[in-house]
Each structure stands twice: as structure tokens, then as C-alpha cells.
Image: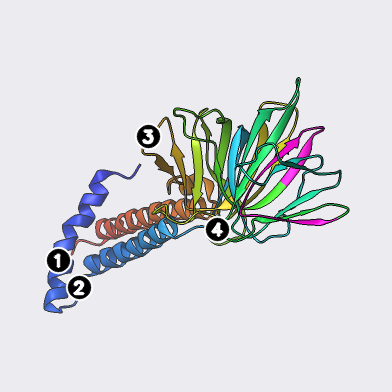
Amino acid sequence: MIKASLIRNKLVLLPAVIVALLKRKPLPVGARNILGKWLFILSILLFIGYVLLAQRENIFTVNGDTQSITIAFSANNINQWNVSYAKILLDVTEPENLLELPSESYFLPQNLTTARIVIKPYGKEQYAFVISAETDNASLGQIETPYEVIDLPAYAEITVPITSSQILPFDGKVRIGEDVGIGVENILLNANVQIVEKQFFREDRYIAAAFSLDAGDRVTLFQDSSKRQLADTRGFLRMKQSDAFAFTIHGEAEVLRVDRLGSNGYGISPSIWPRLTSDPIMAAISTLLATLFLLMEFIELFTKFISRKRVEDAPNTK
């Protein structure tokens, strides 16, 4: 630890430095050394502050199990889902009028189509996932079968029986789970979140934060701190014979919003403090600063020791 007396000795000379600068007089030698040292330390501290507070690229990874997720699809071609043997409800006023699809049928949503996907029982000890899709446009997308292409209207409900494990990739904006309330049956069961932050001078990344979410949370990723613009994400759903499906989502974002049990919600974003220990650049700068400061103290003490020794060894002229 640096002794407090050393710092006090430097502070004593600061008034002389300020007076000399105001009167534009030559600085005393001791004051000049102190000024140079403090300017050096100030520049290092300013650089560290800039590195700490500079904008970083954060990638949020969320994975877990849920019974509900809402996706606003992008125009990416990855949004093609196998809906073999599905039943499609095209008109809510005619629930008995269902369109049944053959094997090798695929759902191709249009850009900006929003779909809510939930799990529900389907027969004895069997489950299906239901895609409730809608859009503000004339058509929410198409169904491609081996025999024809079906243009879907602005709303459709697609019930797909789960016959085996199935992966559904997607690209778009998501909301995971539903906020618990009256009439809510499908919720988030569990989830883990990792925030991976980019290093300052390199393309490598490190884990800036990791935490778990509670059952019943509703999770939304935003690309701005004001939580107005939803973040673009990419991920996949893994359907299986269960009352929930697994999901993994990656997206560059600024904040993750969690709504819990009807609350107003709170935001989660990475803190700057993990950068001190997790970012190798910051750790190196901090170590270098401490080493340089101690070296400067040692040089000053050594110089004072040599000067005192010379005074003591000088011949007495009296």
C-alpha cells in the first residue's frame, strides 16, 4: 500500500504549482516534477475511464424451456418450418372448416408476420404446437406442399402434431413467455441468460454477466437502453413430446427486460465493473498503472536518499 504521507507530500506542493502557473513563473524543480507526475497519472486515469465507459457490443444468449414464445419474423430464408400433417384454421368463424396438410409441408412466413407459438395436448399422451400467426398485410405467408402452394390470409392458426423431435430455426424479434395473470396458461418454465461482451481492442469476447430467470417471467430483448426498439435475434425451438419446448436465442442488444407477476418490469444490462477483471486489456492497464505508480514512488524515494547522502558526505566548509 502507498503511504498516506507520500500523497500528502505531493499535495503540499500543489499550491506552489497553481500559483506559478497563474503568475506564469518558472516552477520550482520539485513542483515541476510533481506536476509532470500528476499529469501523467491524470492522463492514465482518463484513458481508463474512456475504456471503462466506451460503448461495447453485447450479445445476449437466452436458453431454457417455455410453453409460449412470440416471434416477429424477418425476411430471412431460415424461417421455413416443417408443418407436416398440420391442420390449419383459416376462418375463426368456421372452426370446423380445417385444411389438412400432407407430409413434407412447410410454413414460409412473410416479413413482419407475428406468430405466437404454444404447446397444447393433442390426443392421448401426445402434444402439438400451435402457430397463431397474423400480419397487417394481405397475406401472412405461404404453405408449400409437394402438390401446391397455398397463400395464407392475414390470420391463420396452424396446429402441428409432434411426432418426433423437431428443430425450428428462426430469425426475427422475440418475446419469451407470458406475464402471469388471469387466463394465462402457457408460461416460461425456466431460462438462463448470458451476456457476452466484446473486448475493447480485440474481436474476442468474455462473459460479462450470467443469471437465471424465474418461472412465469416474460422476457424481451431491446437494442436501445430506452427499451423502444426490439432487438434482432436468431435462434431455434426444439419441439418434443412434452408440455414445453426448449429454445435458444442469440441477439445483439443493450438491455433485457423482465416482466414478473404483473410488475412494471425491470431492465438487465451488463455492468462496467466486470470489465476490470474480465477484459484482459483493462486488467493489463490496471496492472501497468499500479506498477508505474510504485516505480515512480521508488525513484522519488531513491532520489531523495541520494540527495541526502550527498549532503551528509559533503565536506564541512565552516
Q: Residue furthest top?
A: 124
**Amino acid tagged 1:** Ala
Question: What residue do we see at 36% from left, 59% from top?
Answer: 45
Q: Which residue range is magenta in the image?
A: 148-168
Whichever of labels 3 and 2 marks the residue nearer the N terminus, that label is: 2
**Amino acid tagged 3:** Ser
> Would you say 188 lies left or right of 158 here?
left
Query: Circle 3 sits in a helix, a strand or a loop, which is it?
Result: loop
Q: In whole angstroms, how far apart are the C-alphas of marks 4 and 1?
A: 72 Å
Q: Which residue is mark 3?
A: 263
* Circle 4 or circle 1, nearest the eye: 4
Question: What residue do we see at 31% from left, 54% from top?
Answer: 305
* Circle 3 or circle 4, nearest the eye: 4
Query: Circle 4 sits in a helix, a strand or a loop, which is it?
Result: loop
Q: Residues within 10 Å of mark 4 (few under 14, many from 20)?
A: few
Is the C-beta separation of discs 3 and 4 under 8 Å? Answer: no
Q: Which residue is mark 2?
A: 27
Residue 280 image position (x, y, % from top left): 55, 51
Whichever of labels 2 and 1 marks the residue nearer the N terminus, that label is: 1
Whichever of labels 4 and 1 marks the residue nearer the N terminus, that label is: 1
* Circle 1 or circle 3, nearest the eye: 3
Q: Which residue is mark 1?
A: 16
Q: Residues within 10 Å of mark 3 (few under 14, many from 20)?
A: few
Q: In whole angstroms, how far apart are the C-alphas of marks 2 and 1?
A: 8 Å
Q: Pick the residue in front: 68 or 88.
A: 88
Q: Residue furthest bottom?
A: 24
Please state, as top left, top right, bottom left or bottom right, where the C terminus lies in the image.
bottom left
**Amino acid tagged 2:** Leu
Question: What residue do we see at 24% from left, 62% from top?
Answer: 315
